[in-house]
Image (spheres, helix red, strand yellow):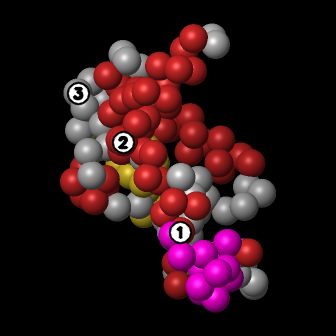
């Protein structure tokens, strides 16, 4: 994701990432980070909590306007109200792609997910601009 953000930033559009590990985000080169200490896979809060999620999104967009230089981090003022370990945020069944990888039916998961093309994000964005 950091690569995609850097390409978008190079085109003159500011970006921000909501992340639970801001130091890791900075190491990977994310231009701007809205930091939250929430359980993994729940960066916007609890499922179906529309009010809480909107608050986080609004605070994130506000942080985007206050971070003037790439590399900045804003710690959002939200706290998780119970123990993160108690959160049941994993599905009861593994996704089909995960099953196929574990069963070794897919030998190149990176290729299947298209990640080998990530270095060409700038070219992809330039092609997309022709259709705008």
First of labels 2, 3 by sequence position: 3
Q: Quadrant of residue 11?
A: top left
Q: Tell me the quarter of the image containing the C terminus.
A: top right
Tell me, yes or no, if residue 130 can be seen here: yes
Magenta segment: 97-108
Q: Residues within 10 Å of mark 2 (few under 14, many from 20)?
A: few
Tag in front: 2 or 3: 2
Towards the viewer: 40 or 63: 40
Q: Which mark is residue 45?
A: none
Give SS at disc 3: loop
Q: Nearer the viewer, residue 83 or 4?
A: 4
Place residue 63 in its image quadrant. Answer: top left
* Magenta-colored stretch includes residue 74: no
Q: Is residue 132 left or right of residue 110?
A: right
Residue in the picture at 30% in, 29% down: 67
Vertical order, 46 against 100 (above or below): above
Residue shown at the point (71%, 46%) measured from the top left: 51
Q: What residue is shown with label 1?
A: 109
Nearer to us in this view, 99 or 45:
99
Q: Does dot 2 land on a helix, a strand or a loop?
A: helix
Q: Is residue 64 visible?
A: no
Label number found at residue 69: 3
- For the residues labelled 1 and 3, the Cα–Cα distance comes to 36 Å
Task: Check disc 1 and report its element: helix, strand or loop.
Answer: helix
Give percent across and percent down for residue 90: 66, 78
Residue depicted at x 34% and y 61%: 21
What residue is pinned by disc 2?
Answer: 119
Residues packed near mark 1 inside 10 Å, few (<14), some (14 to 19) or many (20 plus): some
């Amino acid at each position: 994701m950091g690569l995609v953000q850097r390409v978008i930033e190079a085109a003159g559009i500011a970006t921000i990432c909501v992340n639970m590990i801001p130091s890791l985000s900075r190491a990977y080169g994310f231009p701007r980070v809205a930091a939250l200490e929430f359980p993994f896979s729940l960066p916007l809060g609890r499922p179906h909590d529309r009010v809480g999620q909107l608050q986080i999104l609004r605070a994130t967009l506000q942080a985007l306007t206050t971070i003037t230089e790439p590399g900045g981090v804003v710690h959002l003022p939200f706290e998780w109200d119970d123990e993160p370990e108690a959160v049941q945020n994993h599905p009861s069944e593994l996704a089909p792609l995960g099953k196929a990888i574990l069963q070794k039916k897919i030998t190149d998961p990176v290729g299947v997910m298209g990640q080998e093309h990530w270095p060409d994000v700038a070219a992809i964005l330039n092609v997309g601009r022709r259709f705008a």
